[in-house]
Image (cartoon, rainbow, N blue to C red):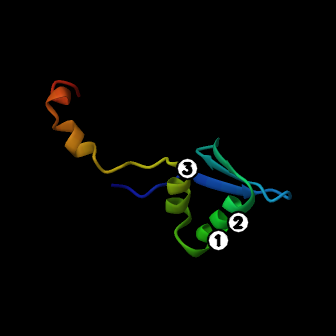
Amino acid sequence: MPAPAGFTWTARADGTVVVAHRGRKAATLRGERAARFTEEVEAGDPQEVMARWTGAYKFRNERTARQHPRNRGRR
């Protein structure tokens, strides 16, 4: 599975953090959540952190779902 990419984040003067994915706003964080997010981004891999915080990541069950009888005829 490829690593997450295309995320950017901006911290505003009022403490709000805006996370965008491929140029579109994906999340707006305020207060304590914004502070925790900033700490996590600076400590770890920023792309993975932003993917996790916005929920824009795959759940690694795609292969299993493809084999389900309901989905076998679709491709």
Q: Amino acid at mark 3?
A: Thr
Number of numbered callouts drawn:
3
> What SS does tag 3 mark?
helix
> What SS does tag 2 mark?
helix
| Residue 52 x/y as whole percent | 50, 56
Q: Indicate whether 40 appears above or below 6.
A: below
Q: Which residue carries the number 2 mark?
A: 35
The reply to whether discs 2 and 1 touch (Cβ–Cβ < 8 Å) is yes
Q: Indicate whether 47 appears above or below 42.
A: above
Disc 3/disc 1 C-alpha distance (Å): 16 Å
Q: Residues within 10 Å of mark 1 (few under 14, many from 20)?
A: few
Disc 2/disc 1 C-alpha distance (Å): 6 Å
Q: Which residue carries the number 3 mark?
A: 54
Camera-side residue: 45 or 40? 40
User: Quadrant location of residue 46?
Assistant: bottom right
Q: Which residue carries the number 1 mark?
A: 39
Disc 3/disc 2 C-alpha distance (Å): 15 Å
| Residue 67 x/y as whole percent | 16, 38
